[in-house]
Image: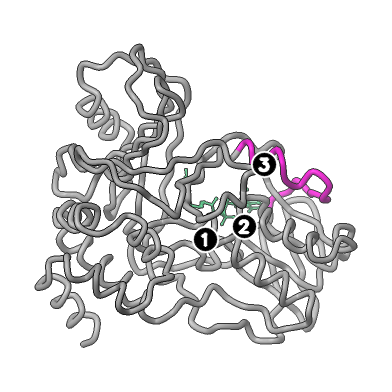
Amino acid sequence: MHHHILILGGGAAGRWLGEALVNKRPDLLNKIAYIEKDNQKVNDRTWCFWEKENNLGGYTTRNWMHNRHNDKRYSLYPYTYQMIRSSDFYEKTLNKHTIIHEEVLHCEQRGDVVYVQTNKSTYTADYVMTSVPVEPIKLSSTFCQSFYGLYLEFAEPLFDEQEIRMMDFSIPQQSYTQFVYVLPLSKTQALVEVTRFADAPISEQEAMALRDQYLQGIHYTILDKESGSIPMTPDLDAKRKHHHRDLRVIPIGTVGGATKPSTGYTFLRAKAHAENIAYALVNGKAIPTTYRNWRFRFYDRLLLDILKRFPVSGKDIFSRLFERVPHALVLKFLDEQTNFLEEWRIFKVLPKSIFLKAALRDLL
Ligand SMILES: Cc1cc2nc3c(=O)[nH]c(=O)nc-3n(C[C@H](O)[C@H](O)[C@H](O)COP(=O)(O)OP(=O)(O)OC[C@H]3O[C@@H](n4cnc5c(N)ncnc54)[C@H](O)[C@@H]3O)c2cc1C
């Protein structure tokens, strides 16, 4: 069967793309189909991000205005930190689209047509947008951000509902960069996530031991869990701004380079990329990649190099940032929206020699 556009993978990026295309051209609804291997998408992750406006109000489960670092509360204004439970997002998207529940095995462009082989059939399309790796991706390192999160109910009201803890480094570092992330859902409920940056994912046992230490003496019951691992690598960075005009297989989402290497944040970046692709397709323009400004690619490489070589320095670097720089500026920097002067304000507080050495290593 032939489709104008086949979207491989009905996860975050695929869904943003389908929404963006149909928003721009409602008639595309009948010309797009998804191939997604899971019959039923369950609540498999929580997406967090920050925005100045609450543009995703239809999906967001919670939002917060402050971050607590050590014992101090910092405003995130003009941003709010937001959270979407994937089950909510899955429920509200793709309700009208055609979804083929099969597993993609192979995908190949021949001339202007793309052939997609699944475990049951072969499909053709003018364009394939894929968040499924259709050819083996070789990463130069296994460095990743891995986490185990638990939704917990506490016996006592412990939380301020307006305030998160983005990076609480009060757990032992054990030769890694590791921290706890706390997102309160009410005064007595929170998502508590143990996160580690390292070459190999943290094991469940290690994460649970750290969580027990963090919550020592506090009574709680476990409501739900989530865990995962996100690659932290510049290898997926796009090398050019637009895809070649003849290319019909377009990578999106994590495989398309939408994940910021130094943080793992992907969700809104995949959305922005989806909107740019939709605009280009509808207007007959060259399809954009997730290409990023060279400065931010450089900064990410430096931080990753330092985190890999000197993992225990992560605590010092992030603590300096959160203690000495307005948190809204940190978020703007992580969004790659800062100018050079604002970046200088950030670099001033960081340990200089370690960054200079990393810069030299990168340039040589
Ligand atoms: C647990 C977890 C929490 C995260 N939290 C955040 C966060 O807070 N903020 C943030 O910005 N990012 C977060 N991320 C990173 C990123 O946003 C997510 O991984 C995001 O889902 C990536 O979108 P994607 O579309 O590229 O991949 P996915 O959402 O994983 O979608 C890929 C889809 O392809 C399907 N698929 C895979 N193989 C095949 C196949 N062979 N055939 C057919 N279908 C297939 C899968 O079932 C899936 O539905 C998180 C990641 C994880 C794993």
Q: Does the magenta portion include 236?
A: no
Judge the density around disc 1: few (<14), some (14-19), many (≥20) Cα neighbours within 10 Å.
many
Quarter of image, res 233: bottom left
Q: What is the spatial separation of the Cα atoms under label 3 and label 1, in whole angstroms?
A: 18 Å
Over which residues does the magenta segment extend?
A: 87-103
What is the three-letter code of the residue carrying label 3? Answer: Tyr
Q: Nearest the camera: 297 or 250?
A: 297
Ligand 1 under 8 Å from disc 1 Cβ: yes
Looking at the image, residue 171 sits to the left or right of residue 80; the answer is left
- Label 2: which secondary element: helix
Residue 13 shows which numbered tag? 2
Mark 2 is on which residue type?
A: Ala
Confirm or deny contact between disc 2 and disc 1 (CB under 8 A): yes
Which residue carries the number 3 mark? 90
Image spot of residue 292 (x, y percent): 46, 76
The residue to which callout 1 is attached is 254
If you read the primary sequence from the N terminus, does the residue marked by circle 3 or circle 1 appear first?
3
Look at the image and tell me whether residue 1 can be seen.
no
